[in-house]
Amino acid sequence: MKCLALLLLLALTAVGCASRAANDADKLPAVEWRDQQEALDILARRADAIETVTSEGLITLIRPDGESVRFDLAMVRHKSDGVRLRAWKLGRAVFDLTMTPDGVWLLTPEDPSLKQKVRTAGVSARQLVETWKTFDGELFRARDGKLTDAGKMLVYTTKQTDGVTIRCEIDRRSLTPRRYFMSDDKGVTRFTLDVSDYRDIAGQLFPHRYIATSSEGKIVIALREVELNTELAPNALRPPRRAEKLP
């Protein structure tokens, strides 16, 4: 299973992520639930309650050797209509990725020396978004889904039709997902997504930090200025005129 082909330059470390996630969980309100089915229902309803997301932030692409590049990021997401990510650095547009039910479009700079590198970054972001969309409310309604107790954590496991197994570690006290694993049909973990920095926005708990990891590197997203369930502009998910439709 292919997940993330990443980029270059500068160095970034994720020191303190685990402790921040733990402190984050301790500060969240406790959730009362009677049995495993009720816990799964709460998780599914929380995911379903978020129709739209608009935000700004930073996206960092990190190669396995530690080299990385960081961009400013703007994101618009609609639960059923799609996602759009725009990235820029020092005021210069880097890529604009739009994914809707009709396809995927990518806008890259006209500069030939940057085009292929940026295309790689855009495709990496596409792979992250496609995987991200799997982690919705329906994930916790899978017929074969199994929730097991692991002390302070709950572990939810389900198998997809393509043979991929998804495992989710959930903070037991706050019922917030913390880490997703995707494993191939041989049981080898190919992709993980860590989520943390949950904040209450208009009564909804929403994570602001994401770390996607595969054998090809990492993508780190730190969001700010997050708005949930607001009306999107009519052209928010309309691909730019010069964007290329990807296969």
Image: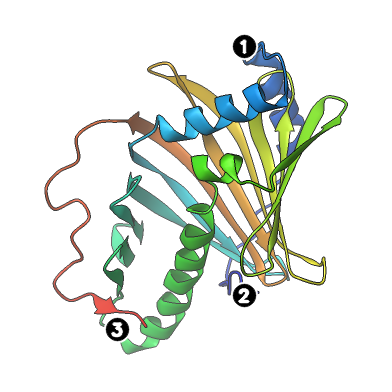
Q: Which x, y percent locates residue 85? A: 35, 56
Per the model, the C-alpha gap separating discs 2 and 1 is 37 Å
Q: Which x, y percent locates residue 62? A: 62, 63
Mark 1 vs 3, N-terminal side: 1
Per the model, the C-alpha gap separating discs 3 and 2 is 28 Å
Looking at the image, is mark 3 or mark 2 nearer the viewer? 2
Quadrant for residue 246, please give it: bottom left
Q: Residue at the far front: name it.
A: 143
* Pick the front one: 31 or 35: 35
**Quadrant assignment for the N terminus:** bottom right
Q: Which x, y percent locates residue 49? A: 40, 29
**Amino acid at pointer 1:** Pro
Q: Which x, y percent locates residue 104? A: 32, 70
Q: Residue at x 18, y 60 (%)?
A: 238
User: Which residue position holds label 1?
Assistant: 29
Instruction: Mark 3: give few (<14), some (14-19) or many (20+) Cα within 10 Å.
Output: few
Mark 2 vs 1, N-terminal side: 2
Q: Residue at x 40, y 52 (%)?
A: 72
* Pick the front one: 63 or 28: 28
Q: Residue at x 62, y 75 (%)?
A: 2
Applied colour scheme: rainbow
**Amino acid at pointer 3:** Asp
User: Which residue position holds label 3?
Assistant: 111
User: Which residue position holds label 2?
Assistant: 2
Looking at the image, is mark 1 or mark 3 nearer the viewer? 1
Residue 200 in sight in this render: yes
Q: Residue at the far bottom: name it.
A: 112
**Amino acid at pointer 2:** Lys
Mark 3 vs 2, N-terminal side: 2
Q: How many marks?
A: 3
From this view, report whether residue 83 is shown above or below residue 179.
below
